[in-house]
Amino acid sequence: MDRISIVGGKPLNGSLAISGAKNAALPLMIASLLTSERLTLKNVPNLADVNTLARILRNHGVDLAVDGKRSEPSPYLGETFHLTARDIVDTTAPYEMVARMRASFWVLGPLLARCGEARVSMPGGCAIGTRPVDLHLMAMKALGAEIDIDGGYVVARAPHGLKGARITFPKVSVGATHSALMAASLAKGETLIENAAREPEIGDVAECLTKMGARIEGIGTSTLRVAGASRLEGAVHTVLPDRIETGTYAFAVAAAGGDVELRGARKSLLDTALITLEKTGVAIAETPHGIRVSRNGRDLEPITIETQPYPGFPTDLQAQLMALMTRAKGTSTIRETIFENRFMHVQELARLGADIQLQGDTATIRGVKSLRGAQVMATDLRASVSLVIAGLMAEGRTTINRVYHLDRGFERLEQKLSGCGAEIERLVSG
Ligand code: UD1
């Protein structure tokens, strides 16, 4: 397995490009199952999760052509995917594929809406809590599906098609909102989705579904009203910039010090995270091409925060913030309210000398004067990148093992950081 090696203490300067959002690209690719026509997606990031999903979709019969291969001078410009699901040849999403990535479970709604049946393995993905699928199933049942669980598979049937309904989620779920929205777009009649997640990636998918012929009101709010169409059409859509990647690099600049422009980043997608970063003493400015982040010599102020669904502070940036706060001048408190087990990075940060106490869902981080490089282990996607941030601050060499987690969600991380002056390299195994 590949490793990443970082020698800390080098400031970051210059600019780096932000890729298309993984968490939008995945559901947008899945939306291709809703139509027999071509869906063209631009600015798709080149990530392991995208490739895994591509394999799953091909298995269902989706034809995928890729063009727009990267070339200088825009090495990070995303690829263009042309997805055509003319015929769905298989409505089963097998365990071997779904177990690799949780979001692949989201094919359930579109398959059911288009074919009247689906058999989808219960998901796997990052081990950051139990992560049930009850809300997805609740939404499909509300739309008229019969659901059985058989041998680890969700078997869903709607022989006469899905019918519009009122779906009131008891808890905010990004995935269940995607599922409900995509299925409702091809259901008969009107669906009201209440307590919907408001993440920008849901808005991006809703806009794409609108181009495909669905009528959706309330985009960006927690109440979505969907007038289902009897058939959806092809469309062309550009994936929005990745706000989690943006936040991660903003935190990396804060950690290492320096001055970097994040090209293609959109500030409005991550206001809470950037305001939090400003409170630590980091300067943020909008530029014509993105966002500029700078910290020159100032101490980092401690922070008290809890993760929340959008527009709150994102759970996907919790580990990165924690890494940064290990060097703050004082004591920070971070409460994780979305996933109950999303603290696996804590023991790895401790290996670098961080002082973090965990009590239930709350971490108390006492800033230390220095971190020291060590061998650490990547445990999940966002935890892995928090170790990169810590490595940038640490004295000496940090080696991160099991970096395949990083490759699931961060495109060309080493190149982007080394282009700004970081001493970081991939040690390829074998
Ligand atoms: C998505 C994101 C992930 C992010 C998370 C929360 C993608 C591909 N992934 O994951 O990066 O960390 O949102 O912002 O977009 N839950 C249930 N029952 C369900 C579904 C979820 O109880 O049926 C719970 C989960 O266990 C969790 C909470 O709801 O505690 C939120 O999860 P959810 O928003 O569904 O996360 P994902 O969509 O899996």
Image (spheres, helix red, strand yellow):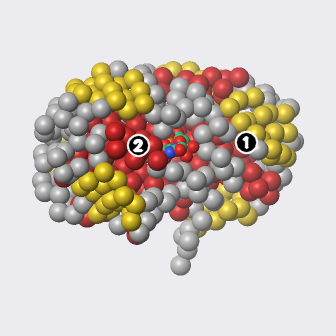
- Whether residue 354 is visible to the viewer of this picture, yes or no, is yes
Per the image, the residue denoted by label 1 is 361
Question: Helix or strand or loop: what does disc 1 sit on?
Answer: loop
Mark 2 or mark 1: which is in front?
A: 2
Which one is earlier in the sequence, the residue at label 2 or at label 1?
A: 2
Residue 215 marker: none
Mark 2 surroundings within 10 Å by alpha-carbon count, few (fewer than 14), some (14 through 19), many (20 or more): some
Per the image, the residue denoted by label 2 is 138
Of 402 and 423, nearer the camera is 402
Disc 1 residue type?
Asp
Q: Percent from the top left, x then y, of residue 89?
A: 17, 63
Question: Helix or strand or loop: what does disc 2 sit on?
Answer: helix
Image quadrant in which the N terminus is located: bottom right
Q: Percent from the top left, x then y, of residue 104?
A: 38, 54
Q: Percent from the top left, x then y, of residue 408?
A: 48, 56
- Tell me the residue at 18%/51% (across/down): 159
Q: Is mark 2 within 8 Å of ligand 1?
A: yes
- Tell me the residue at 43%/66% (across/down): 152
Q: Is residue 255 left or right of residue 60?
A: right
Of 151 and 106, nearer the camera is 151
Disc 2 residue type?
Met
